[in-house]
Amino acid sequence: MNTCFVNPARQLASKGAPRAQSLGTPISRLAPLEFHRLLTYTVSDETNATNKKFPENMARYHPMTLQNTTDEVLQLASIHFKVPREQLTPDDDFFKKLGINSLQALDLLTRIEQHFHIELPDYELQGVSDFRTLAERIQSRL
Amino acid sequence: MLNLRKYSCLGEALRGALDRWPDEICLIESDRDKEKARFTYRQFKEAAHPRARALQDAGLQNGSRAAIIMTNQSKWLISAYAIFFGGGVLVPLDYKLTAAEQLKLLAHSKAEFLIVEHHLWRAIAKEQSFQDVAPRVVLVTEAPPNADLAGAKRWEEFRGTGEPAFIPRARQDMATIVYSSGTGGRPKGCVLTHENYLEQCAALTTLYPFWPGVSYLSILPTNHAIDFMVGFIGPFTCGATVVHLRTLRPEYIRDAFTRYKITYMSLVPMVLKSIERGLRQKFEALPKGKRKVLHAAIAVNRALTRRKPRLKISRALLGQVHAGFGGELRAQFVGGAFTEPKTLQFFYDMGILVGNGYGCTEAGTVITVNDFKPFRPDTVGKPLPGIEVRIANPDAEGIGEVAVRGKTVMSHYLDDPEMTAETIVDGWLMTGDLGRLDAMGHLQLFGRKKNMIVTEEGKNIYPEDIETAFEGLPVKEFCVFAANYLWPARTMVGEQLIIVIHPESGKPMNAELAAALADRNKRLLNYKRISGYLVWERDFPLTASMKVKRLELAEQIRQTAGREAVVPL
């Protein structure tokens, strides 16, 4: 799984609002929530876990399911804290696994916000220590 | 500043401040890089008085208890002032506790009123017991338009008409009930009087004065004693400005420094370390030539400030570094947990003053703080004016339990005379911390005598508070200890909790049980978790009421097992 640094929705919009492939609707007619979902579409690259660049030949679009969100959170954590992706699982206690404190976890939250284009107040991290729950909190705001 | 000795209670002193500096800015609420609210002292009064009136209309009277559960924001201070104005007793609760823990403390404090943020109230209202325990009047802030408030009222709409009646309180009367622990075990509700606060505030502002135009950056939770004092009472009674920042993210802290020209701030070692790390990385990234110039400037500054700080010289020598802190910073205060001397020295060498301090809620916030006369990175400073510190039962090296006496020491623990008697002995507050006073009167800390740990975030964790998480484990009995309590170590870093397990006979500790233990451990907040277990095959010594005699058990363990017997989780 890799991060989509090129926003597919913006690319499509710039070409005179063609159809959004997976939704089958012109972008101009999308409801705000659908448009937001399109903005947060991601590109997966499961074979090259630590490659930060957008691998064009591997690109495929898919909607943000909890599974995808969780995968992307793990990928972001892997890049941010330089831990091999394969060592991280959704149920890991990220404080323990990454050896970080609550302030460093907030750093990760900032990175996540930038990636998903959402805003997560600090308190969203309260009582959360595993990737899966963190992904659920993110998913509820997508 | 106001002459606090002339006032009998916090409500009166704060009222005096609001009338004295009507056009000064008292409070700014900033969320990330967006400013959400700004109040002059007059506007603050205009926001607080209708709430005070509405609280009185709802039954608030002299001595009524009102709790606040909120993150740092303007409504916290407005509500607190409204409560004090109406003669109420404030119960500030930690917003980071779980809803069940908050309900437990609400019940213990017998609070009749509660002011709470909507997201926190939502969690409380999900608890089964909330209707039996929740205070009579609940005000919820920032609730979305169609939210189900579960019987609560909206803070924003809670305004009375007409002027509220000011209810004065005596100096010895209860001002607040602040819980220092007891979410799982026995609640420790420190009863602090108006005198405790007024005396503490007068002492602190003698050392570090505030005045109109001074900005204090508040990032520590206001429910904690330190921010309540230096991020509310102190600045307000001097006409200064409090800047609330609703995030702890370093990038926004840096931004707030420059945007609001911060003069003072308090922080915990973890945040200080993060700032240090960021600065060191920046220095490393400089081109070689610039880095050399910087290190030379730091060396010159170090030589010139050996005896005392010289802010003007430091700012001239290291202008860019100081500009990163807003250019007006006079001092930062660090406390709540152990701070490494080399971190303090790192900042002092650049002319960024970080005053290392020590205190506890029971002592009304601060006991000692560094006054930079001269700078000492190896101590927590000297006692505040009016506070006596002695070392009880010192050993050959002069190290013993730190005892404190003075007008800032709490009155008692709420509804617990037994624990009060154990903690305040002959007028001296026994802190449970081990320290030594040196020839210059500075206090050095060496570890703890009490069974608890302090995390790097400055959180005090008591074993009794987390034991409930392990109830129901298929073992005969268990008990949680601070590892350094079982095996005393003269250190205040890397403190850990462990669980002592006495398995059922014929059911030895196995992988299944270890997994069950790990699973329960995971349910605790990350900073409250135990780090290992010790298997103990003997019966625990018990009191007549079947409670574990912790002291005796600890002594038995100490004599027969060492740290190496602990199995990491």
Image: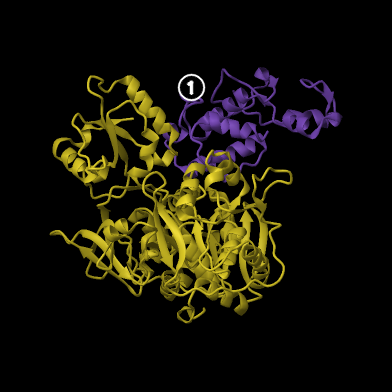
Chain colours: A purple, B yellow
Residue ID at (41%, 49%): B459
Residue ID at (58%, 19%): A46
In the rendering, at what x and y percent does residue A35 appear?
Answer: 77, 31
Circle 1 SS class: helix
Report whether residue B369 is seen: no
Report whether residue B467 is seen: yes
Q: Say how many tags the image has.
A: 1
**Which quadrant holds residue B166?**
bottom right
In the rendering, at what x and y percent does residue B40 appear?
Answer: 65, 70
**Which quadrant holds residue B561?**
top left
**Which quadrant holds residue B309?**
bottom left
**Towards the viewer: B349 or B63:** B63
In the rendering, at what x and y percent does residue B162 appear?
Answer: 71, 71
Residue ID at (77%, 29%): A34
Amino acid residing under circle 1: Glu
Q: Relative to residue B508, is residue A10 drawn left or right?
A: right
In the rendering, at what x and y percent does residue B307 appear?
Answer: 34, 71
> Residue B263, relative to residue B447: is it above or below?
below
Q: The residue marked by circle 1 belongs to what chain?
A: A
Residue position for label 1:
A86
